[in-house]
Amino acid sequence: MNSDTKGSRSKGAATQQRMVESMLELVQVHGYAGSGLNTVLAHSGAPKGSLYFHFPEGKEQLGERAVGLAAERFETLITDAFTAADPQASAGSIVESVVEVLCRMLTESDFSVGCPVSVVALEMGVESERLRRACERAYESWIVPVADFLVTRGHGEAAARATASSVISLVEGAMIVARARRDVQPMRDAARTLRTLLDLPPAATEAGR
């Protein structure tokens, strides 16, 4: 492969990535339906005509990639928090620190930016099976590392999975309420509830199943 071909492919990959990032940013603020393809092109600075070259299946393909990118970023936030935490730190305190990062994201954006996965799930979960599956995969990618961490802290696999699912569901719901109220207190209320739950001894959690 000559250098011109490599350069062309690298440039094409960069253009594609810019469009995915633009779609993600626009969905966070305007929703999926409110993020038109022309707006994505203008926001990304991508050449006209490049959209269907990079995303021949259209807006749903681009939306799917944007959801995937959001999933990767939040998964990294979760895994980094667990990896960097003091070995003596409780699971509840670690999750609380992740929630604080999300609180900052909300306040710094003046509550204009939320979780794009929940936005797409609410808007398109019934309309598009492709996007519903993308959201399902995103949530699964967040549940798994939380469950895996709980297992390392002595929880049984089934109980860890159920608790991890509850963690993600409560945080996602709290973020929606926080945006509606323009106040991060629902997020902090959720974090406090989760800390109580997660800091129970594993045997107590198992007994409740």
Image (tube, rainbow, N blue to C red):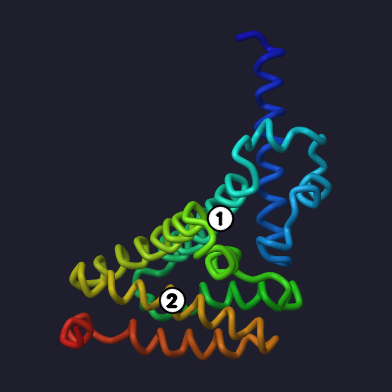
Judge whether 76 appears above or below 53 on screen.
below
Residue at horizontal 74%, vertical 48%? Answer: 37
Viewer-proximal residue among 113 and 52? 52
Question: Dot 1 corresponds to which residue?
Answer: 67
Element at badge 1? helix
Viewer-proximal residue among 173 and 206? 173
Dot 2 or dot 1: first in sequence order is 1
Viewer-proximal residue among 123 and 1? 123
Q: Amino acid at mark 2?
A: Ser
The alpha-carbon separation of the residues under discs 2 and 1 comes to: 17 Å
- Density class for disc 2 (Cα within 10 Å; few <14, some 14-19, many ≥20) is some
Residue at horizontal 65%, vertical 8%? Answer: 2
Question: Dot 2 corresponds to which residue?
Answer: 169
For residue 55, the mark is: none
Judge whether 104 appears above or below 192 on screen.
above
Residue at horizontal 38%, vertical 65%? Answer: 143
Q: Position of residue 201 (x, y in %)?
A: 23, 84
Q: Position of residue 161 (x, y in %)?
A: 28, 69
